[in-house]
Amino acid sequence: MNARIRVLLVDDSAVIRRLLADVLSGDPALEIVGQAPNGRVALEKLPALKPDLVILDVEMPEMDGLETLAEIRKREPRLPVIMFSSVTERGAIVTLEALALGASDYVTKPSNTGNMATALQRVRDELIPRIKTFCRHLAAPTPLPAPTEREKSQMYFQRY
């Protein structure tokens, strides 16, 4: 079986962490290895969890996402971090700051989508492809099946 992409979720909202965990766990390539309510807790968990990618909210108590991102970059310069916040939008100052601090990308939390199913589908459509892009080195290629006896003999005769 291929290795699953290990994801750490960092958001002060337990509801958002739960929804994200449910959405991402629905993909067999992803595994939620931990959750944290703020950056300080996330940094404490980082060495033990060894995630392949962090999804990080911006606005959190104690240690916000930008402070956390700066510290992650000092400790794990190559660890992909996707900012996931209602304040990360194209051109927003906080988004530009996050990218300047080393965020790999950003996804805006859905709002005004009309219903929960639409919001969850949007998260699925925007977040999962980004996670897989940043962690594509972990997705081992599917091995080819061993050739049958007939295929072996055909290969032998094609050579001669």
Image (cartoon, rainbow, N blue to C red):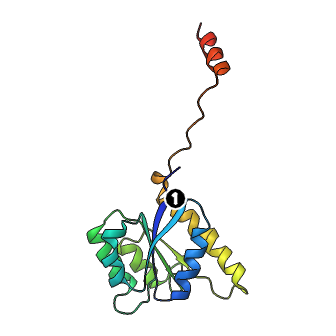
* Residue at 50% from the left image edge and 82% from the top image edge: 88
How crowded is the residue under tag 1: few (<14 C-alpha within 10 Å), some, or many (20+)?
A: few
SS state under label 1: helix
Relative placement, left or right, of 43 versus 111 is left
Quadrant of res 73: bottom left
Instruction: Decide: is 13 above or below 142.
Output: below
Horizontal and vertical percent position of residue 114: 73, 87
* Residue at 57% from the left image edge and 69% from the top image edge: 25
Instruction: Specify the quadrant that holds the C terminus.
Output: top right
Horizontal and vertical percent position of residue 83: 46, 76
The residue tagged 1 is 133
Relative placement, left or right, of 48 versus 32 is left
* Amino acid type shown at disc 1: Thr
Horizontal and vertical percent position of residue 154: 66, 15
Of 68 and 89, which appears nearest the observer?
A: 68
Quadrant of res 108: bottom right
Relative placement, left or right, of 3 versus 119 is left
Q: Residue furthest bottom?
A: 61
Horizontal and vertical percent position of residue 89: 53, 81
Instruction: Decide: is 41 above or below 52.
Output: below
* Residue at 55% from the left image edge and 59% from the top image edge: 29
Quadrant of res 39: bottom left
Q: Residue furthest top?
A: 160
* Residue at 27% from the left image edge and 69% from the top image edge: 75
Of 151 and 160, which appears nearest the observer?
A: 151
Of 1 and 108, which appears nearest the observer?
A: 1
Instruction: Please state the total of marks drawn on the protein image.
Output: 1
Instruction: Decide: is 147 above or below 140.
Output: above
